[in-house]
Image (spheres, coloured by chain):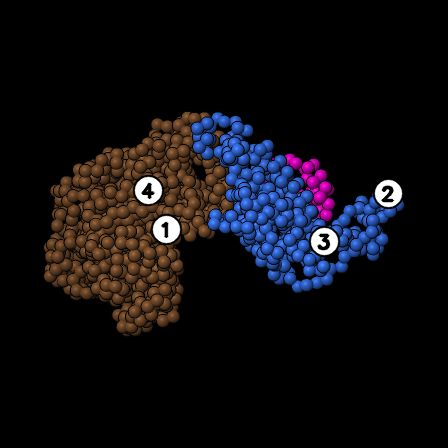
């Protein structure tokens, strides 16, 4: 901000760098090489978020129905995010949608856009990321006012068709500072609460009371983005499945079908597009209807259709690997053999500094920061523990 | 928690205490130890009330010789808040030291209007009509008549109070006005008279400023208070104005007309009495020969407003002969009204001192000064003798007598100004005769003299060294505390230029410049598009606000503003403003966003909080100087210069800046809150204005927030709002709090 005052006429693109001051965090190491920033500090920052997210083992809802409400009102055309708030939101949402389906293959997602005082459906609840992204990209224009009430009402009508085991979530990405509603929004919020919709809000400008109210009432979260990177970050926080709502926790069996892929060259009428399709597709095991993509719901008999790979990919949310403990490198211990070791994952030397030393509480093996991230965010298995099991078997 | 300050055990009902609260307690204790007065400034939102209550009640526990705490607030709402805090404190004390030791009786006292539970009387709308309605049912002669004649209506609650309440005092506890009403209903006792009686026994009394400062009221309410009391004036930044108003009287044409009607009616009643009950009048005459009208104990329900002059100035001698007889007195009043009417009928502005005014009065109309002094008491006595209950109808003649008594009593510190029309609207004849008190120290002097310790405190008392001079007293402690913040939740800015880099100001020669008006409009427009929820704007006066809103409307700025937020405007009408405020809050609650246009020195600027989302930004358009051509202000400035050696410029700036600080202080009411403040006038950039802002604003007013233009302010606002929207770290906010252990550690260190 000081930069800003000294040179108020600075161009927007210049300012991006002036605000960052990325050169100030450069550090020169012994050999004269420049390194970006204080590694260890950043690593700790990253881990703090992880630890916060994990918490004790809780029941999670892995079959989610998430309704994404995007605000493309006049305020979304503002250019304090470059090139515009809307473009930035669209990019972040694209990433979010991909990540969401990657981690929650059993879940569905729909997109609603608010503009010109009304809310309209861009995509119905469905399971295909590409379809959502395509529809969103063809819908990029902003004008008029935003109406949270209309958005929530529309999302509420969606919810009625969701089976009771599904988790109903709404994520609102809100650029505007006010909402122009046809009626009393507080009534709508009550309705959403009664329908057990969990509404979270991601703001782009400032804290708005009604958004806070909505999220508090319905048990969602509320965050405001500082900048583009932060926006992506808080949006991605909605990717891991949330804790199950306490009143929805009655265990119930869900009927699912595991369809087989149809043979190449087979001609069938596609149940989802209602036209003749050749080859590919999956055949519903109950009614033999052809569907194009998995996971989905059979449009004839209503059976949930998934593949076993999807189930497996959701499984790790229920049994997460414990967060690793950071071992503080004590100067007195540095020479000792127990600390001289290397990362169990990649065999990098851990004694040199530049990386945190993290230990798995179960197998007591040490890992470097990069492996820690890989294990927790992609692998979902601890190599140390796996080898222990193997040893036990043999 | 419980801790020890220099040997005094303090009970504090929360687990943590802010640093500044602790410092405040230490200073306050020093003042109490020294049995002197003190002046303390601490920003709002730091828990001033609980700090005060906690220390003083603990002090009372340790020193039983201390009689009571008199806590003065400005509004009923504040009064209830104080009592609620006290209740929490009391519960904690009971828990700590047992209910037998922590015995306390605390209550609020307000007018009949707020306390009456009589089904018919309490539904009256104005204070005067409730008072009169009460009197009609409770006056001693009414009740005496009712004993023989059951058709005469009395108040069952008052009767109940008379029968039992006066013997059986209220059990110890903390009573808000609401509690008193509930208790009164349960027992069938009148809460008002119960409260009036109980203040003698109470340890803590919470009431309005008027009850101590206005001699008319304090004469009957606060007469019996012991010297060993601690008096607290909370939110006392305008205390000098309250003092002045307590001793000022305005007379207009309608007052005089009303007074004439009243006199006519009095004449009728007197002649009726002469025929039926001449004896009564004779008795009264005899009483007056013997001494003052008010001798002997009047019954509680009979007395009304006491003499308007200060206690030590009331003459304790016989009423002069020429107004002893009822008909003579009424004739005297008639002449006085006639004379005032003649004076009011003028084309030029007249300014006179009380001495010359009374001299001309006695030569022109034969009204001597001695008799004038007795007017108020004489009227009082007459109304009692005539058993008049509809005192609300006799308000006008009371006002006139009030005026006559004041003008007859005081020779300095006052001035009489007759204006044929309002300066701002010279076409409309609206003659007014103003007796204005110029010296704020007059009204408050008896308070300082009578009580052991007087604490004057507020969020905005800067510059703090001016108050002792204005009020003419010697405080033992003067201190201004700053706020320890966990994050920079205040963002004051001084905006000196519009986006076109031209200076903006409400200076007289610039304010109607379309460029300035447009720049102010653009500022508002940019801000409503940047700030969520509630925005409050303050203008320097109603006429300026009307003008600028008109121009904005013509320029189309207002329409653009309304696309972002709904617009609400404060008017001089009380009901309208209340309605506007209510809708403003609703618009903020439901996310539509709203902007409130208001006036510095108005009702909103003084008493309404715009905390949390109701006020994320406050814009002060211009510097709220007083209307400098006002005759009263000039008289006061002259007096201040001659008597207290306060320069005109200094006083005007002081007054303007304290109003501005008061306005912007509306948005921040607690540490968890956040808000921005924009001072939109280039003159705030001058060090003589900026340095007069309260310390807690100055400390947040960073170098780069001075001399801004609109676009820079918008940028700062955006950044600030994003920063404040981030969740605050509970670990950090703990660091400004002191726990029991911290305090013990500090106490162990001798040189803290």
Cα separation between marks 4 and 2: 79 Å
Please report, as a chain letter, where disc 3 is located: A
Cα separation between marks 1 and 4: 15 Å
State the image coordinates of residue B285 (x, y, percent, origin top left): 14, 61
Query: Which chain can be seen in blue?
Result: A
Cα separation between marks 1 and 2: 74 Å
- Front residue (pair A221, B679): A221
State the image coordinates of residue A234 (x, y, percent, origin top left): 58, 45
- Seen in the image, is B480 located left or right of residue B714? left
Asked which secondary structure carries label 1, the reply is: loop
Q: Residue at x 21, y 64 (%)?
A: B65
Label 1 sits on residue: B46
Cα separation between marks 4 and 3: 64 Å
Label 2 sits on residue: A278
Q: Earlier in the sequence, mark 3 or mark 2?
A: 2
Q: Which label lies toward us, 4 or 3?
A: 3
Please report, as a chain letter, where disc 2 is located: A
Tell me the magenta residue range: A119-148
Shade of chain B as shown in the rendered figure = brown
Q: Which label lies toward us, 4 or 2?
A: 2
Q: Which mark is residue A312?
A: 3
């Amino acid at each position: 901000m000081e930069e800003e005052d000294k040179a108020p006429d600075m161009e927007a693109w210049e300012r991006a760098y002036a605000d960052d001051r990325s050169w100030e965090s450069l550090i020169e190491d012994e050999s004269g090489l420049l390194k970006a920033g204080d590694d260890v500090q950043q690593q700790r920052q990253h881990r703090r978020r992880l630890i916060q997210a994990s918490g004790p083992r809780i029941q999670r809802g892995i079959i989610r129905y998430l309704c994404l409400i995007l605000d493309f009102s006049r305020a979304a055309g503002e250019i304090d995010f470059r090139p515009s708030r809307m473009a930035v939101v669209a990019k972040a949402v694209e990433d979010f949608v991909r990540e969401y389906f990657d981690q929650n293959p059993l879940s569905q997602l729909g997109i609603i856009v608010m503009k010109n005082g009304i809310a309209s459906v861009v995509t119905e609840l469905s399971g295909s990321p590409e379809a959502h992204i395509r529809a969103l990209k063809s819908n990029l224009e902003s004008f008029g006012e935003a109406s949270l009430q209309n958005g929530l009402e529309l999302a509420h009508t969606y919810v009625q068709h969701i089976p009771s085991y599904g988790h109903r979530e709404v994520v609102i990405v809100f650029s505007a500072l006010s909402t122009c509603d046809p009626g009393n929004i507080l009534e709508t919020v009550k309705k959403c609460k009664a329908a057990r919709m969990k509404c979270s809000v991601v703001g782009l400008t400032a804290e708005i009371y009604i958004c806070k109210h909505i999220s508090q009432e319905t048990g969602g979260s509320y965050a405001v983005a500082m900048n583009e990177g932060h926006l992506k970050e808080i949006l991605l926080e909605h990717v891991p499945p949330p804790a199950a709502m306490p009143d929805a926790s009655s265990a119930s069996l869900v009927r699912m079908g595991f369809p087989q892929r149809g043979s190449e060259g087979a001609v069938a009428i596609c149940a989802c597009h209602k036209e003749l399709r050749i080859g590919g597709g999956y055949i519903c095991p109950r009614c033999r209807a052809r569907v194009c993509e998995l996971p989905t719901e059979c449009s004839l008999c209503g059976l949930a259709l998934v593949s076993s790979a999807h189930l497996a990919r959701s499984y790790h949310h229920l049994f997460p690997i414990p967060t690793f403990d950071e071992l503080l490198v004590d100067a007195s211990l540095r020479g000792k053999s127990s600390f001289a070791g290397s990362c169990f994952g990649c065999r990098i030397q851990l004694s040199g500094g530049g990386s945190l030393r993290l230990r798995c509480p179960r197998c007591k093996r040490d890992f470097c920061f990069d492996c820690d991230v890989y294990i927790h965010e992609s692998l979902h298995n601890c190599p140390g523990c796996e080898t222990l099991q193997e040893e036990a078997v043999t | 928690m419980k801790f020890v300050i220099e040997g005094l055990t303090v009970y504090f009902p929360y687990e943590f205490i802010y640093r500044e609260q602790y410092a405040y307690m230490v200073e306050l204790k020093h003042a109490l130890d020294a049995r002197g007065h003190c002046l303390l400034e601490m920003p709002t939102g730091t828990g001033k009330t609980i700090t005060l209550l906690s220390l003083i009640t603990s002090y009372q526990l340790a020193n039983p010789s201390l009689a009571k705490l008199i806590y003065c607030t400005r509004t009923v709402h504040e009064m209830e808040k104080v009592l609620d805090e006290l209740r929490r404190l009391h519960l904690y004390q009971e828990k700590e030291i047992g209910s037998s030791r922590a015995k306390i009786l605390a209550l609020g006292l307000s007018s009949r209007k707020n306390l009456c539970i009589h089904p018919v009387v309490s539904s009256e709308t104005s204070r005067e009509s409730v008072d009169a309605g009460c009197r009609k049912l409770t006056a001693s002669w009414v009740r005496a008549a009712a004993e023989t004649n059951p058709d005469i209506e009395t108040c069952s609650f008052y009767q109940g109070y008379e029968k039992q309440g006066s013997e059986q005092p209220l059990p110890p506890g903390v009573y808000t006005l609401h509690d008193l009403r509930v208790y009164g209903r349960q027992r069938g006792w009148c809460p008002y008279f119960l409260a009036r009686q109980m203040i003698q026994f109470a340890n803590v009394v919470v009431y309005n400023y008027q009850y101590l400062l206005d001699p008319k009221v304090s004469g009957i309410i606060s007469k019996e208070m012991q010297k060993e009391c601690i008096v607290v004036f909370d939110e006392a930044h305008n205390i000098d104005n309250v003092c002045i108003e307590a001793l000022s009287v305005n007379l207009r044409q309608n007052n005089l007309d009303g007074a004439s009607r009243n006199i006519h009616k009095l004449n009728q009643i007197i002649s009726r009495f002469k025929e039926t009950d001449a004896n009564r009048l004779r008795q009264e005459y005899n009483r007056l020969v013997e001494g003052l009208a008010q001798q002997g104990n009047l019954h509680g329900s009979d007395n009304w407003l006491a003499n308007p002059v200060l206690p030590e100035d009331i003459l304790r001698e016989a009423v002069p002969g020429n107004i002893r007889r009822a008909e003579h007195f009424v004739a005297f009043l008639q002449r006085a009204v006639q004379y005032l009417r003649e004076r009011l009928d003028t084309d030029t502005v007249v300014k006179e001192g009380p001495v010359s005014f009374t001299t001309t009065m006695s030569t022109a109309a034969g009204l001597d000064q001695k008799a004038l002094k007795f007017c108020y008491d004489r009227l009082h006595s007459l109304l009692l003798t005539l058993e008049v209950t509809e005192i609300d109808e006799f308000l006008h003649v009371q006002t006139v007598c009030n005026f006559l008594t004041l003008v007859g009593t005081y020779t300095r510190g006052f001035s009489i100004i007759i204006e044929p029309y309002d300066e701002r609207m010279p076409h409309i004849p609206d003659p007014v005769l103003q007796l204005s008190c110029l010296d704020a120290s007059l009204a408050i002097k008896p308070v300082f003299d009578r009580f052991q310790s007087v604490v004057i405190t507020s969020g905005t008392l800067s510059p703090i060294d001016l108050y002792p001079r204005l009020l003419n007293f010697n405080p033992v402690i003067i201190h201004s505390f700053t706020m320890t913040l966990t994050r920079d939740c205040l963002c004051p800015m001084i905006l000196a230029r519009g986006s076109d880099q031209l200076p903006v100001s409400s200076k007289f020669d610039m304010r109607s410049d379309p460029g300035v008006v447009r720049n102010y409009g653009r500022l508002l427009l940019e801000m409503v598009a940047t700030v969520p929820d509630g925005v409050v704007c303050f203008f320097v006066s109603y006429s300026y606000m009307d003008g600028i809103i008109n121009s904005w409307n013509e320029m189309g700025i207002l329409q653009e503003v309304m696309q972002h937020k709904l617009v609400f405007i404060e008017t001089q009408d009380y009901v309208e403003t209340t309605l506007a405020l209510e809708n403003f809050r609703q618009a903020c609650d439901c996310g539509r966003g709203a902007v409130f246009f208001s006036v510095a020195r108005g009702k909103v600027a003084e008493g309404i909080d715009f905390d949390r989302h109701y006020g994320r930004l406050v814009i002060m358009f211009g510097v709220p100087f007083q209307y400098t051509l006002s005759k009263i202000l000039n008289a006061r400035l002259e007096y201040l210069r001659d008597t207290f050696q306060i320069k005109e410029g200094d006083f005007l700036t002081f007054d303007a800046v304290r109003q501005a600080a008061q306005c912007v202080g509306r948005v921040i009411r607690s540490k968890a809150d956040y808000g921005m403040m924009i001072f939109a006038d280039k003159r705030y950039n001058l060090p003589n204005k900026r340095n007069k802002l309260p310390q807690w604003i100055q400390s947040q007013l960073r170098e780069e927030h001075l001399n801004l233009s609109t676009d820079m302010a918008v940028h700062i606002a955006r950044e600030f709002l994003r920063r404040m929207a981030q969740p605050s770290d509970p670990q950090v906010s703990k660091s400004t709090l002191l726990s029991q252990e911290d305090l013990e550690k500090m106490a162990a260190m001798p040189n803290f």
